Image (cartoon, rainbow, N blue to C red):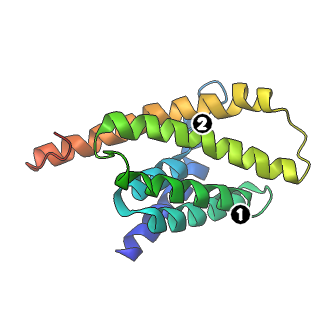
Amino acid sequence: MRLSLLLMVFGGSLAQSSVVPSWSVGGVTPDLPLILTAFIALRRGPEAGCLVGFAAGLLQDVTGGGLLGVQALSRALAGFAMGLLPGRLWVGHPLVQIPGLVLLTVAEGLVRFGLLQLLHFPASIGELLAHVILPQALYNGFLGAACVLAVELAQTLRGRHTWT
C-alpha cells in the first residue's frame, strides 16, 4: 500500500512537470500533486495526507528550482488539515470534496505566500490572489470534479456506489 502511494506521488509530480504545462489556460495550470494530496488525505487520514503532501511538495521544490522546502511544508500542512476533515464532515460526498479542494488550494496558496513573506518575497497579496491562487483554485476544482466523477463512474460500473 505504501508503494502505491509513492508511485502516485511520483507519477503526479512527473505529470505536473511534463504534461500539465500543456494544459495551461491563460497562463494558469492545475496543481495535480495538491489534488492528489487532498484526495489521499480524505481517504486515508491526516498522517497519509501529510506524508504525501510533503513528498509531492518536495518533488515540486526540487524540479521547480524555487526555494527548497516551501512547497513541501505548505503541502504537508494542507494534507494534514484535509485529513482531519473526515471525522468532522461527510467527506464521501462529491459536493463536499470539490469545495474542500478549492478552499484547500486557496489556503495552501496563502500559507505558501506567508512562508515566502518570511523570506522577504516581493509580491503583493492582491496580485497573487487575483492572478495565481484563485484561478488555480478554480482550475483545481474543475479537474478535481472530473477526477471524482471518473472514480464514481468506475465504482458504479463495478456495482459499488459510495456516497448515496
Residue 62 is tagged as: 1
Q: Label 2: state its secondary structure.
A: loop
Amino acid under disc 2: Thr
Which quarter of the image is occupied by the C terminus?
top left
Task: Please say if the residues under marks 1 and 2 sit with CB atoms less than 8 Å apart.
Answer: no
* Relative to 16, 98 lies left or right: left
Q: Label 1: state its secondary structure.
A: helix
Q: Earlier in the sequence, mark 1 or mark 2?
A: 2
Residue at the location (40% across, 62% down)? Answer: 45
Measuring from the top left, give residue 119's x and y in whole percent. 88, 54
Residue 29 is tagged as: 2
Residue at the location (56% across, 44% down)? Answer: 31
Measuring from the top left, give residue 36's x and y in whole percent. 46, 53
Of the pair 151 and 162, the residue shown nearer to us:
162
Q: Would you call the spot at circle 1 few (<14 residues within 10 Å), some (14-19), or many (20 or more)?
A: some
Residue 77 is tagged as: none
Residue at the location (70% across, 48% down)? Answer: 111
Q: How far is disc 1 from disc 2 in space, using C-alphas?
A: 18 Å
Measuring from the top left, give residue 27's x and y in whole percent. 67, 29
Measuring from the top left, give residue 48's x and y in whole percent. 45, 67
Which quarter of the image is occupied by the N terminus?
bottom left
Residue at the location (52% across, 54% down)? Answer: 81
Above-or-below relation of 123 to 26: below
Going by the picture, which residue comes out furthest to the front?
88
Above-or-below relation of 31 to 73: above
Amino acid under disc 1: Val
Going by the picture, which residue comes out furthest to the left?
159
Tag count in the figure?
2
Above-or-below relation of 135 to 55: above
Q: Would you call the spot at circle 2 few (<14 residues within 10 Å), some (14-19), or many (20 or more)?
A: some
